[in-house]
Image: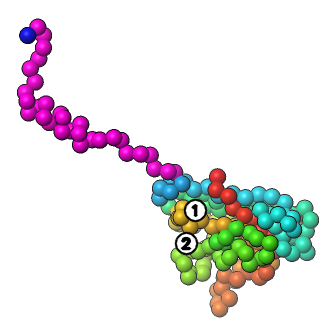
Amino acid sequence: MGGLMRVPAFLLILAASATACAGPSAPVQNAKTAPDDTINLSAAGEFTTDDTAAIAYDRKLAPEGAQASVTVESSGGETRTSLTVEGLLPDRAYGAHLHTKPCGTKPDDSGPHYQHQPGKIDPVSEVWLDFTTDSEGKGTSSSRNAWNLDAAKLPGSLVIHSKATVKSGPKVGTAGDRVACLTLEQD
């Protein structure tokens, strides 16, 4: 037979069925929807009175030139959020939270606080980023939450409030009027 090797029939059948069962390779999952993949959100800008990407609702508490940037990274069972502000009133406490909807021309357009566990009002379910500005009106805050963002239900904005967040009691989670807002975009 000139160097050809005889393969037993059962091996040919076994090889053929393995190939048939394998089929085409599975498609790669979209990184934005798979539960273990990273979701990045961000926003930055100088607060104006007419651009809802970075809008000021109270010019006394967010003066001309005030600006902020926020980043949200969610992966590996953890969501990390960082906020930096400049140009706000010096030596003053503000509250800040992620909200469910993008900013709008009216303060309430951004909806309620984003909650990982709906109805649970605390810094475990919500993202609270209270900060106190320094003598130049600068401030920073960060938060780590032990959950991933749901790609089907992402927060739409970061809202800066006029007061620090109430930590307990009947007004838990409130932080005064909405001062300014940044609309989050997915990176």
The amino acid at mark 1 is: Thr
Left or right of residue 32, residue 58 in this image: right
Foreground: disc 1 or disc 2: 2
Q: Secondary structure at mark 1?
A: strand
Q: Which residue is mark 2?
A: 116
Quadrant in the rendering for residue 162: bottom right
Residue range of the region highlighted in magenta in the rendering:
2-31
Disc 1 crowd rating (10 Å Cα; few below 14, some 14-19, many 20+) is many
Residues 145 and 19: in front is: 19
Q: Could you tell me which residue is drawn at 56 percent across and 82 percent down?
A: 119
Residues at marks 1 and 2 touching, judged by CB atoms closer than 8 Å: yes
Residues 178 and 94: in front is: 178
Q: Is residue 92 above or below residue 174?
A: above
Left or right of residue 3, residue 67 in this image: right
> Given the current orientation, which residue lies at the most extreme bottom position?
170
As for residue 76 lying within the magenta part, the answer is: no
| Lower position in the chain sequence, tag 1 or tag 2 | 1
Quadrant in the rendering for residue 113: bottom right
The amino acid at mark 2 is: His
Quadrant in which the N terminus appears: top left
Q: Secondary structure at mark 2?
A: loop
Q: How is the image coloured?
A: rainbow
Quadrant in the rendering for residue 160: bottom right
In the rendered image, residue 134, in percent from the top left (x then y), is placed at: 85, 66
Left or right of residue 167, residue 50 in this image: right
Q: Could you tell me which residue is drawn at 10 percent across and 24 percent down?
A: 7
Q: Which residue is mark 1?
A: 79
Q: Is residue 38 above or below residue 66?
A: above
Measure how far apart labels 1 and 2 are at the Cα level. 11 Å
Residues 155 and 69: in front is: 155
In the rendered image, residue 24, in percent from the top left (x then y), is placed at: 33, 40
